[in-house]
Image (spheres, coloured by chain):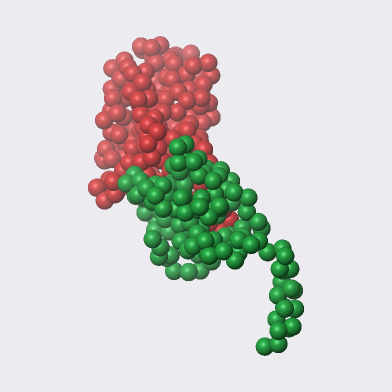
Chain colours: A green, B red
Amino acid sequence: MDNSEADTERTAHAPVEDLPPRLAEDEFYRALASSKRRRLLSYLLETTDSTVDELASVLSGWEATATGTMRTQRDRLNRRIELIHVHLPLLANTGLIEYDPATGSVELESISPPVADIIRQSINAEDRSPSPTDA
Amino acid sequence: MLDSLIVEHRRTDHQFTVYRSGDQPALETWLANHGAATESRPLPPGGPDPFIEVKTDGEVVGVIGVNAVERLLEPPVVSLGDRDDISKGYQVLFKALEKTVFSGMHRRDLLAVSREIEDRAFRIREGTLRVCFQTLSMFTSQTDVYRTLATETALDIHIHGVEDWTPPAITGITYHTKAAEQFEPYWALAYDGGPDEAYACGLVAQEDSDEYTGFWTNESAIVEEIATTLRTG
């Protein structure tokens, strides 16, 4: 393919200088490599700030609607443990959220529109994919 | 007494949080109309269907899709006779819904809840329905409903209330005005479920400066307690 043509095409979609550097970071894609974390981020895009307890209910409820069954107290506690030990520290290290383990408060960091779009589109795509398999 | 039943139900505190992206689902409206502590949180567009978190005494006891609950609450009001088949989680939800103490409700809200109990009695068509209308004049606007209940079913209907109005004689309806003063602050209904006590349901509400506090229940033992209190008052 001719180089100049490829450049023209890319410029037509979005000027390179407008794209957030985050989109080139491996860490960002590691953060998105879990449907649970994508769900958390999409919820935080709606509410901006939340708590560990609320997020545990959000993940549980999301699963409950997919299966049509009740998520029990124990199911929710498992989600809470995963949040505290895996998902929230990872999202905080990536700089996508601010997480205070002492108070349990979770806040979305400022996220540029292209990054927010990717998160939203990943959630919209869930509808069309078979039940997400995720750790 | 009826007030001790209300106090007993107050011991358990339930809270409901509905997560949704669109309009208020029927379940949320229903809970709010029943005076339950209900709040809502926004879900992202394209996200999950609405779901509800049930808390008992500050602890989350279950999270379930609103659609799944609404299917269970649709008339004919949950076939409670099949309770053994209902998973533990659903039982928790039912218990939570049943034992919800409401407060700050008004006459029209109570009329809506009462209508549900009357509808159930109408569908089953048998059994005893006991209603305390505080004063018989409050029965005035309900006369037509109760005439239908009494004449189109085999229900045995008992109306309790202070006699400040002379109600029409209707076959199937017995009025109790003696000792009714002690029940004047209470709006109460008790339907024994007729042939199947699994269909029993009741309501007790205490009036305080135009607002009502109380509970509704599907537990036959509590319904019987309400009925006995009214009958032996």
Residue drawn at (43%, 65%) of the image: A132
Toward the viewer: B79 or B141? B79
Report whether B115 appears left or right of B220: right
| x and y, in percent, of residue B140 in the image | 51, 24
The outermost residue toward the bottom is: A1
Vertical relation: B24 (above or below) A7: above
| x and y, in percent, of residue B204 in the image | 39, 25
Report whether A29 appears left or right of B87: right
Toward the viewer: B224 or B105? B105
Residue drawn at (41%, 47%) of the image: A84
Toward the viewer: B210 or B123? B210
Q: Quadrant of the C terminus of chain B?
A: top left
Residue drawn at (30%, 34%) of the image: B219
**Res. A131 in view:** yes
**Res. B25 in view:** no
Vertical relation: B47 (above or below) A102: below
Report whether A28 appears left or right of B192: right
Vertical relation: A32 (above or below) B170: below
Report whether A94 appears left or right of B97: right
